[in-house]
Amino acid sequence: SAVAPDAKNLRVKLVLLGDSGVGKSCIVLRFVRGQFDPTSKVTVGASFLSQTIALQDSTTVKFEIWDTAGQERYAALAPLYYRGAAVAVVVYDITSVDSFTKAQYWVKELQKHGSPDIVLALVGNKADLQENREVSVQDGLEYAEKNGMFFIETSAKTADNINQLFEEIAKRLPRPLT
Ligand code: GDP
Ligand code: MG
């Protein structure tokens, strides 16, 4: 009879970076609790949550998520959170070209100071606000491809692509040798 192989259990440190107000905390809350709270509070410093997902190959991935504050006065603290992170998720708001510019700043910072094998994801959030779009899908995709990043547009409000974001990241993690 077939014996199921042992499930591999991965634990990864993930950091969210991006301008204040792009929806980082809402993405985390949607992923971890399945909720969207339009009156959610501004993150002070950083907050921590974890969530485990199972992949089809029976690997489980426990994400240890550091959700940072985007305000300038906390920028100097960012290295504390991305240092040693296996994954960095850089978020912008598709209705704000300024937030896309800020996202590019974070990508450069991570390329300079993050760990060399870090998995980078670029996320265009608030995809439900199509009528206010300032950043095209094409612009997001091109920037991500040029920088070797995974790209996805999400909506924390409607839950669109939130689970897919974390599943795609999980698939891209370097696996321990067996
Ligand atoms: P953070 O500063 O990046 O953590 O942003 P927050 O998660 O605090 O969200 C900032 C604001 O954007 C809040 O008013 C949220 O309700 C709103 N928001 C977050 N995600 C979405 C989204 O996907 N769609 C829409 N329409 N609003 C969102
Ligand atoms: Mg926040």
Image (cartoon, rainbow, N blue to C red):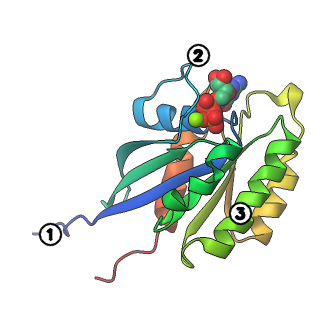
Q: Nearer the viewer, residue 4 or 152?
A: 152
Q: Position of residue 128 (x, y in %)?
A: 73, 28
Q: Which residue is painted at 62% across and 50% down in the image?
A: 17
| Label located before the other in sequence (3 or 2) | 2
3D distance between C-alphas at marks 3 and 2: 29 Å
Q: Position of residue 30 (x, y in %)?
A: 50, 32
- Please give the label number shown on residue 2: 1
- Please give the label number shown on residue 130: none
Q: Dot 2 corresponds to which residue? A: 39
- Which quadrant is the C terminus positioned in? bottom left
Q: Secondary structure at mark 2?
A: loop
In the image, residue 77 sits, relative to residue 135, either above or below, namely below
- Please give the label number shown on residue 107: 3
Q: Secondary structure at mark 3?
A: helix
Q: In this rendering, does residue 134 appear at all? A: yes
Disc 3: CA contacts within 10 A as few (<14), some (14-19) or many (>=20): many
| Label located before the other in sequence (1 or 3) | 1
Please state which amino acid type lies under the numbered disc 3. Val
Dividing the image into four quarters, tell me where ligand 2 lies. Answer: top right
**Going by the picture, which residue comes out furthest to the bottom?**
177
Please state which amino acid type lies under the numbered disc 1. Ala
3D distance between C-alphas at marks 1 and 2: 51 Å
Q: Which residue is painted at 54% across and 75% down in the image?
A: 115
3D distance between C-alphas at marks 1 and 3: 46 Å
Contact check, label 1 and label 3, Cβ < 8 Å: no
Q: Position of residue 103 (x, y in %)?
A: 75, 53
